[in-house]
Amino acid sequence: MNKVLEINKVSLGYNNNLILKNIEITLSKGDFLVIHGKNGSGKSSFLKFLYMKIFPISGKYRIFGEEVFFSNKSFINRCRKKMGIILQKNFLIPYLSIFQNVQLSFEVQSNNSTSNDNRVFEILKWVGLEKKAELKVVNLSDGEKQKVVIARALVSNPPILIADEPMLYLDSISREKLFFLLKAINKLGTTIIVADNQNKDEYFNSRKVNIEQFVITK
Amino acid sequence: MNYILNIFQKSFLNDEKKFLNLLSFFLMSFLCMHFLLYLNFFKFSDSWINNESRIVTIRISPDISEKKIPRIKESEILQYFEKKKVFEYVRLLTENDLKEYLGLGDLHSLSSVRVPLFLNLKFNNEFSEINFENFSKIIENRNYKVTYHKDEILEIQEFFFKVKLFIILVGFLIFILFLFFLILIINAALTANYKFLEVVQLMGADSKQISINISIILLKKIFLGTIGGSFFSVFISYSIVKIFSIPFYNHVDILSTSFFELFEIFFYLSFFIIFSLMIIFLLLTLVTFKFLEKRFFG
């Protein structure tokens, strides 16, 4: 099995105040990991650590077999290019069209100076937004915006997808569709890490980790 | 990164474009005007000092029995210096020259005063000592005193230096003010667009590349004002020189300068503008880079 992420005895915190301790998780290619836990239990902090926005107090973190040194920013940038990231309040550029928002991510992450319109259309078709490609983001519903965010995260075909509560603000139908999308991507070999505040049934056959087991109790 | 550049172009400081052009127009006008005035003053003071330091004044006092030196003797003295061929000119200061110089233009004559003979000599090229061999034979028992202007202009040189320093300091102050405004504007724009920048950073975009792109955009937005300001400053400095008849080296007088001199002005001015823009570019890139790197981690 190809190890994608290896987290070894990692402790996280802010200003030396420990939040999570001794996290040990290993993820291989095609894994679907759901991290659940109550609000404020540290799920988002853990995801921030995964996409290297915060660095650990102790422990080791390896991506594709290479150890992450938080002083090496060019390495971090290279790793981030291999990640699709969906944040809780994801930022889309309102005055740009759906197509342009997705193309932006493709241009940054693919290291390709020439834009590949076909790939952008392909991913938009996949999330069911190909007919609305020229619409400005400001005119979309929350569910559609979330699909744009997913398309943007996946357009460069990253091997890892990190999503922080992607189902938030979505109705049950959109959630079902989104979950189906994530599963389909996962089957294609993308390693997915999703944070959710509930242990939902939708994730019935996924690997689950309750973040609360790492929480420091005072 | 061309696509990001286009997005930045649309999103960054788009509403402030007119303000930025106006700001750069005024501040660059001031800056270029200072540069042109400095250039003029530099040329003027340089040529004035060079000119003056080559001049020597010789005062020959008449004999006790004379009211003034006889004309025949004046001619002999003139010939003595003219023969040396190291002087551009040998000029005898007439009675009228002296009256004018002393502010005694209303006086009818200086007949009651023992007037010395004054000679102004100007060296051809570089200053050198005058060889007064056999001079005493010509002037006989009359006294003479030689004044090298080079020794007398030290104070003026100091004054010129102070004026140049003043122009540079005021120009530097305006430039700092311009930079300060630009940094404030870029900081506000970065803060307003931070969420977008954070997303781009999370995608793996290089801070250096983003900083360069943002600086290029800001430079593009002030470019028109800068060019306009530089032309305006040429016009204004030309007018100042003309209207106030400033005895500067006639360097911005476009009508009376040769093509080469005109080219020289524009070469220096263009070089100055490019140099200023480069400093602005480097500083803005540095500020933006620092802003992004500070937020690279949460």
Image: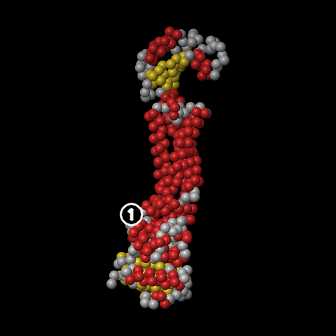
In the rendered view, would you say A138 is above or below A19? above
Residue placed farthest to the front in the image?
Answer: A131
Examine the image and state in which quarter residue B64 appears: top right
Q: Give me the residue at 47% from left, 27% from top.
A: B54
Q: At which x and y percent is residue B254?
A: 51, 34
Q: Give me the residue at 54% from left, 54% from top.
A: B179
Q: At which x and y percent is residue A196?
A: 50, 84
Residue placed farthest to the right in the image?
Answer: B106
Examine the image and state in which quarter residue B247 appears: top right
Compare residues A110 and B249 and report the one nearer the observer. Answer: A110
Q: Give me the residue at 54% from left, 73% from top.
A: A140
Q: At which x and y percent is residue B271?
A: 46, 44
Badge 1 amino acid: Thr
**Residue A113 showing in the rendered view:** yes
Q: At which x and y percent is residue B200?
A: 47, 68
Compare residues A22 and B119 and report the one nearer the observer. Answer: A22
Compare residues B124 and B248 and report the one nearer the observer. Answer: B248
Residue placed farthest to the left in the image?
Answer: A1
Circle 1 residue: A114
Q: Give me the residue at 54% from left, 16% from top.
A: B117
- Say which chain tag 1 marks: A
